[in-house]
Image (spheres, helix red, strand yellow):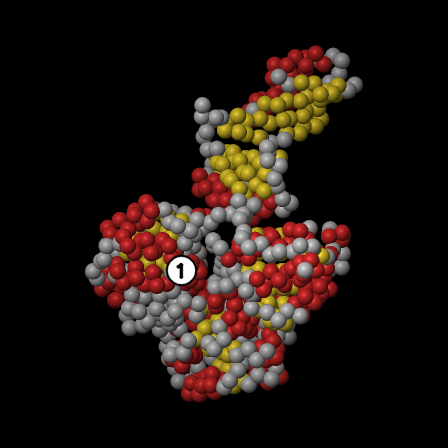
Amino acid sequence: MEDDLKKTGAEILVDALVQEKVEYVFGYPGGQAIPIFDALYCCKDLKVVLVRHEQAAAHAAEGYARANGKVGVCVATSGPGATNLITGIADAYLDSIPMVAITGQVATGYLGTDAFQEADIVGISRPVTKHNLLVKDIRDLPRMLKEAFYIAGSGRPGPVLIDVPRDISAGSLDNYEYPKTVSIRSYNPTVTGHPRQIEKAAEMIKNAKKPLIFAGGGVITSGAHEELYELAIKINAPVTLTLMGLGAFPGEHELFVGMPGMHGSRAANHALQETDCIISVGARFDDRVTGHVESFAPKAKIIHLDIDPATISKIVKVDIPVVGDAKNILTALNKLVVPRDASEWNDQIKKWRGERLFSYKQTERTIKPQYVVEQVYELTKNRDTIITTEVGQTQMWTAQYYRFAKPRRFISSGGLGTMGFGLPAAMGAALAKPGMLVIDMAGDGSIQMNIQELATISINKIPVKVVIVNNEYLGMVRQWQELFWNKRYSSTCLRGGFLCEECKGPGHCKKKYVPDFVKLAEAYDIPAFRATRHEEVVSTLRRGLDIEGPALMEFAVAPEENVFPMVPAGKPIDQALEEL
Amino acid sequence: MSIRTISVLVENHSGTLSRIAGLFSSRGYNINSLTVGETEDPSVSRMTIVVGGDDAVIEQVVKQLNRIIDVIKVIDFGDDPLIERELILVRVDSSKSNRHEIVELAGIFGATVAHVGVTSMTLELSSTCDKADNFINLIKPYGIKELIRTGKVAMAQPKK
């Protein structure tokens, strides 16, 4: 009996993961993590997904967490393994994604000696973690693990890193027991909104002539989409959703005005500039949303619901702050708000909204990237589908043209804007939600940042569909260069290199594009299809989507297509550039 | 722009100090002084941070400090009356001829003589920061060889 309670540090760690109901651990082994992986080897209650790069382990853990709301877990070794996780950890930090990252570390006696594969990962990760811990005594390990999961998943979620020196993971502890409860005197997030503040908010909404709901990722984290819907219907207010909030309100609903900000809809940006009352729920007024802050929403009083008090009045001055969990606050608020009939404001919104929120010039000659996104939407809207994205133009076109109906269906790197996010995130999402269709909407630039994960997908038969919109450029930067840098496409042409002498521009270049994505996919034993003409788009998508398991579909699109509307950085959001 | 004193109760762990220092450096806020020490409860340390900034900056500092998991309590003293002290050690050039004069000056401020050498004298003063500034100004003409200030520690005055 006593022997049952004696466990090694690594066994304690794995037992904690099982107790926390972790299904998948995304990881990569290494010298100082061998004890941890040894304990994982015989664990029947969870699966280890061996990625091909630690950055992908962190993004896959994020994808898992973003798809089902649970804490995602990744494991890496000390030194380079741990530093490779950092981008994914920072990504989770900026988007408030619950994650526990476990790193191996050199033995405590070697700490600070520049030992082989030693990096001060607690120091390095400090500014991009919600909390981090170095285990110095095995007796602290069970409590620290419990705290890590609690901190990662509660309040405003975020990544927590635990650094486990080798003598801790290989050491042993008598009388191990995983704590059942957790209590941290210095950490008590406020979840219930202050009743008086909620009353004031209801009063302000009642008096508003032109209310606008502005919601972000907090609604999705909190699971408050039904309450948000109820509020919108009750007060007949238009809804705009930030990139992180897409899916929190049905994308086809007539009250939905699209995403605001730099690449937002005309309707959303005009509504923000004209509204007299913004009801902000779980959004943080990011600079990509506000544009020039001083001229943002000049006529509006602002009600701000957020679980993080530090978000309130950080960027814009808030009139009525309500700190707490969105679902709790909205439930209370919905009982107090007075129903509002449609008014001139609603007519105005309809006018701004027009036939469609976003539009582009269709051609039959070349494939338009927006058309690819539209067709993906048409073919998948009746199936429960999760879309992940890489970062850049394709991410924006997806946010604009795919009309997300439900929360946790759009998984994208919002705050950090991490290229290489989409493929590993899709992997995590597909494992979190078996049976759902998962598609990574990728540009040809971003996909190459973590393309090695095609191996992980192929070997584990993870049914991820990859749609590559190939414009042969780092399109978003190229777009900025076209509009603001005199068309000097410095280092954004993916055909080009330092051997290029004179650039004649797209369409005139005789250089070969590499890689051949279809051949590459085939090398990974993944079926792949390519479309080069407009009329091939739908059939190519069908072929890729209909087969079982992973598939890659590549679309050769118009190389110089831009994302419009576009508000130049630092300009007021109603001064967007439109397609000429 | 004003100078504010903030008192922070934190878990007495390694790592807490660098998290707090990082909060200031990553946002470009300036710390005028920072002192740390144990409290009546050995598991809790108290930091006294003196920071300059407008009201919005101070509000963010307080909120961001509160976000740190190991921070138990943040007290922004604002304009509340404080009991504040700073300890300074100052070594000045001195010889037989001016020793008495310096001791006399120190006496006015309540400073004590910590050490006397052949060519220097080391004075110790515990006082408010303003008074310490004054003292340093007056001692300067004698030639300061070395000066150390601990930074401010402060407690709010009790209400009754």
Q: In x, y percent, where is residue B20?
A: 57, 44
The amino acid pointed to by label 1 is: Val
Q: In x, y percent, where is residue B57?
A: 47, 42
Picture quadrant where residue B96 is located: top right
Q: In x, y percent, where is residue A573?
A: 37, 59
* Disc 1 chain ID: A
Q: Secondary structure at mark 1?
A: helix
Q: On the image, numbered disc 1 is attached to which residue?
A: A219
Q: In x, y percent, where is residue A15?
A: 62, 62
What residue lies at 38% left-to-right and 60% top-to-bottom?
Answer: A224
Nearest to the observer: residue A389 or residue A185: A185
Mark 1 is surrounded, within 10 Å at the Cα level, by few (under 14), some (14 to 19) or many (20 or more) other residues, namely: many
Tell me if residue A357 comes above or below residue A371 in the rendering.
above
What residue lies at 44% left-to-right and 60% top-to-bottom?
Answer: A221
Picture quadrant where residue A578 is located: bottom left
What residue lies at 48% left-to-right and 26% top-to-bottom?
Answer: B158
Q: Quadrant of the N terminus of chain A?
A: bottom right
Nearest to the observer: residue A429 or residue A179: A179
Q: Quadrant of the C terminus of chain A?
A: bottom left
Q: Left of B72 or right of it: where is B114?
A: right
Count of marks placed on residues: 1
The answer to whether residue A573 of the structure is visible from this angle is no
Tell me if residue A65 comes above or below residue B64 in the rendering.
below
Picture quadrant where residue B86 is located: top right
Nearest to the observer: residue B54 or residue A496: B54
The answer to whether residue A197 of the structure is visible from this angle is yes
Q: Left of A46 or right of it: where is B91?
A: right
What residue lies at 40% left-to-right and 73% top-to-bottom?
Answer: A402
